[in-house]
Image: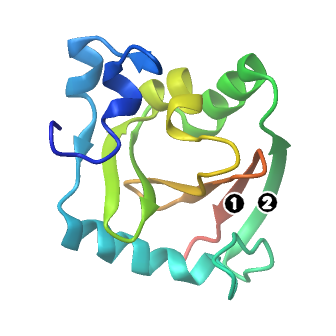
Amino acid sequence: MDEFPLQWRWTDEQHCILSHEELCQIQPLFPDYAKEIWDSSLNFIDQDAHFSPNSERFDSIEIIDAIESTTINSWLKAKMADTHIVVFWQPKLAVRMTSTLFAKYWDEFCYPSCDDVFIWPENGAWIIYYAHYEKFFFGKLINE
């Protein structure tokens, strides 16, 4: 974790200090593995690298404004259940963590005006996309 480029978000008192137990739940992925997951996400983004809700692979799409932290926390808990997820910002920049921790601290992973973030469960049943203009997109994937 010490070498992960975004670790300051969870260890710097100007941002957020997570407990040791919480930090242990965040596991940076090796860049090559993160890139594999990123490549899979290309099916869900448009030519400008934005989430494309028009993908034929979705059974349903929901969109919610990411303004009220408490509302988002509850919404995320309901959508993600209790599972392990991968959160990624760039092709080689991703972490594996619990959905419970992400829901609790989502605004430390999704910064407005600068972050576009994909969140995937390990079972691949859905995808959540946080757009830097403060919207969450939830896409339930069609069972294949």
Residue 131 x %, y %: 70, 55
Quadrant for the N terminus in the image = top left
Residue 30 x %, y %: 17, 61
29 vs 114, left or right, is left
130 vs 96, left or right, is right
Q: Between residue 60 and residue 32, name the one nearer to us.
A: 32
Point out which mark residue 61 bears: 2
Q: How far apart are labels 1 and 2 at the CA level?
A: 5 Å
Mark 1 nearby-residue class (10 Å; few <14, some 14–19, many ≥20): many
Residue 35 x %, y %: 31, 74
Label 2 sits on what residue type? Ile
Point out which mark residue 139 bears: 1
Residue 108 x %, y %: 51, 30
Q: Is residue 104 above or below residue 64?
A: above
Q: Is residue 31 above or below residue 42?
A: above
Mark 2 nearby-residue class (10 Å; few <14, some 14–19, many ≥20): some
Looking at the image, do the residues carrying marks 1 and 2 touch, with CB atoms under 8 Å apart? yes
The total number of labels drawn is: 2
Q: Residue at x 77, y 44 (%)?
A: 134
Q: Residue at x 53, y 20 (%)?
A: 104
Q: Residue furthest bottom?
A: 47
Q: How is the image coloured?
A: rainbow
Circle 2: element type = strand
